[in-house]
Image (spheres, rainbow, N blue to C red):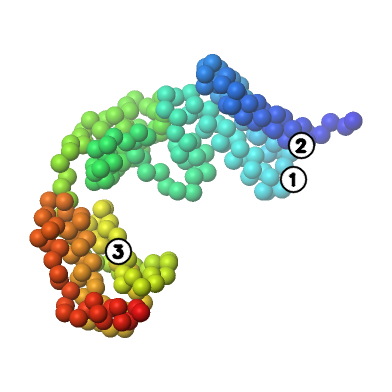
Amino acid sequence: MVFNDRDYTQDAIIKQASLIELHSKDGSALDAGCTCIEGKHLHVIEGLAEEGKGFAVSEKEKMFYDQLAGLSRALRKNMEGDNFDMQTVLHEAELNPYPRKYEPHGKTECERAHPEVLRKISSCVKQLEKKHDCAPPYIDCPVNPVAVCRASIKCVEGSFKPKDVTEITKIDYPKDLGKQPAVSEISLRTGKILVHLNPKLRENPKLEKAILEHELREGSCIYNVTVDCHNKAVKHEPKGTRKQVDELLA
C-alpha cells in the first residue's frame, strides 16, 4: 500500500480530536487533572495542520488547515492559563465573527446592573491590552488589565443613577403587531426609547404623536426608578385617542 501524506494527516487529526473528546468526557481531564489535551493532543493537531497546508489540493482545504492550526494553538495557550475563555480563543484564532467586548469574564452583580461602569472598564482593558501588547489569559503581560481597571473604576451600588428618557427613536419591528398600537423598548445605554408603531397608525399624524408621547412617558417612568410612577403615569392620551386606535386596529 502506497503511503499517502494527505490521507495520513486527515486520519491522524481525527484520532487526536477523538482522544480530546474522550478525555473531556471520561473525567481524566477535569477530575483527574490530566493535562494531556493541552500538553499533547493539541500540540499534535497543530503540527499536523501546519503540515497539512503543504498537502492541500485547494485553497479552501489550505484555509481549513490554517484555521485549525490557529485554533489548536489558541486553545492550548488559553488552557495553560487560569481562566479559560472561548471568546478569547476564537478572537486570537481570528475565527470570532463578533468583535471582542474586552469585558471581565466573570461580571459582578454591580457590573451587570450598571452598564455604564462595564463600558468604562471595557474601554480601559482595551487600552491596556494595546499598550502592553497582550491578551487573556495575560500570562506574559506585565499587568492584569482587568484587575487594574476594576481597581481604578470601582462599581458602587447607586453611583450611577438612571435618568429620564427624553428622546424617541422610531424603529422597524420584525413581527406583526396585530392589534397592538406600538411596541417599545428602552435603551439603557443611550437613555432613549425605541418605538415601532403599528403601520395602520402612521397615516394619522395626530394619533401617531399621541401614541409616541404615551410610550415616552411610560418608558421614562419605568426607566427612572427614582420617580414616583404612580403620580407620573397619569392619563395623558388626548381625549378619544384610545377609541380611535381601537377602531383603526379592529
| Residue of label 2 | 6
Q: Residue at x 47, y 36 (%)?
A: 86
Which of the numbered marks, if any, corresponds to residue 57?
1
Disc 2 crowd, CA 10 A, few/some/many (<14, 14-19, 20+): some
| Residue of label 3 | 184
Which of the numbered marks, if any, corresponds to residue 199?
none
Q: Disc 2, disc 1: CB below 8 Å?
A: yes
The kind of secondary structure element at disc 2 is helix
**In terms of image quadrants, where is residue 235?**
bottom left
Residue toward you, 19 or 180: 180
Q: Residue at x 31, y 32 (%)?
A: 146
Amino acid residing under circle 2: Arg
Residue 56: percent from the left, percent from the top?
A: 72, 42
Q: Residue at x 11, y 54 (%)?
A: 227
Residue toward you, 199 or 134: 199
- In this rendering, does residue 180 appear at all? yes
Residue 141: percent from the left, percent from the top?
A: 37, 27
Residue 94: percent from the left, percent from the top?
A: 51, 42
Of mark 3 and mark 2, the one earlier in the sequence is 2
Q: Disc 1, disc 3: CB below 8 Å?
A: no
Amino acid residing under circle 1: Val
Amino acid residing under circle 3: Ser
